[in-house]
Image (spheres, rainbow, N blue to C red):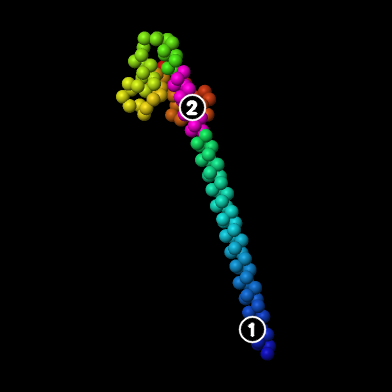
Amino acid sequence: QKELAKAKARMKKHLKLQEWLKEKEERELAALQEEEEEAAAIEAERLKKEKKRQARARKAKKKLTNYYKELMDAADPGADALASVASGGMSGGGGGGGDISAITGGSMGSGFDDGVGEGYEVG
């Protein structure tokens, strides 16, 4: 009878341990899932900001291209060929309209980060 009581106690202890391990695993899985959701939310926010940044960069580039085109038109109204190059017309493939590297001498900086004081030399 003592052995039976000991066996029941061991069984009870074992079941309690199994239950605790199961709860621990569930907590870890919940924490992992929460971490993944947080990382996904951060990545989505980063992508959203990057899209906005790219849109601002495109808008700034377009504005700057138009400004240089107007500047060239005002400086020499007869220079249609240069204005055409500024708008991407006869450039022979500069990726479409607005390749201002033809006017600026390619000194524009490769990426618009915030567009503040970075590589705007007219050469």
Determine which of the numbered discs, if any, sits on residue 66 in the image.
none
Q: What kind of element bears circle 2?
A: helix
First in sequence, mark 2 or 1: give its number.
Answer: 1
* Quadrant showing the C terminus: top left
The quadrant where residue 2 appears: bottom right
For residue 114, above or below residue 13: above
* Residue 55 is one of the magenta-drawn residues: yes
Can the viewer see residue 3? yes
Q: Which residue is nearer to you in this view: 105 or 86?
A: 86
Helix, strand or loop for the magenta stretch, by majority: helix
Residue 23: which quarter of the image?
Answer: bottom right
Image location of residue 75, percent across then percent down: 42, 10
Across and down, in percent, residue 38 comes to: 57, 49
Mark nearer the viewer, 2 or 1: 2
Name the image quarter holding the N terminus.
bottom right
Q: Distance between the residues labelled 2 and 1?
A: 78 Å
Q: Which residue is drawn at 51% across and 33% down?
A: 53
Q: Is residue 58 left or right of 3 when viewed as pictured?
A: left
Magenta range: 53-67
Q: Residues within 10 Å of mark 2 (few under 14, many from 20)?
A: few
Who's the residue at 36% across and 14% down the image?
Answer: 80
- Residue 121's spot in the image, x, y percent? 45, 19
Give the residue pinned by disc 1: 7
Q: Residue at x 60, y 67 (%)?
A: 22
Name the amino acid, label 2. Answer: Lys
The kind of residue tagged 1 is Ala
Q: Report the side of 95 relative to 116 (left or right).
A: left
| Residue indicated by mark 2 | 59
Q: In which quarter of the image is residue 108?
A: top left
> Does the image show residue 105?
no
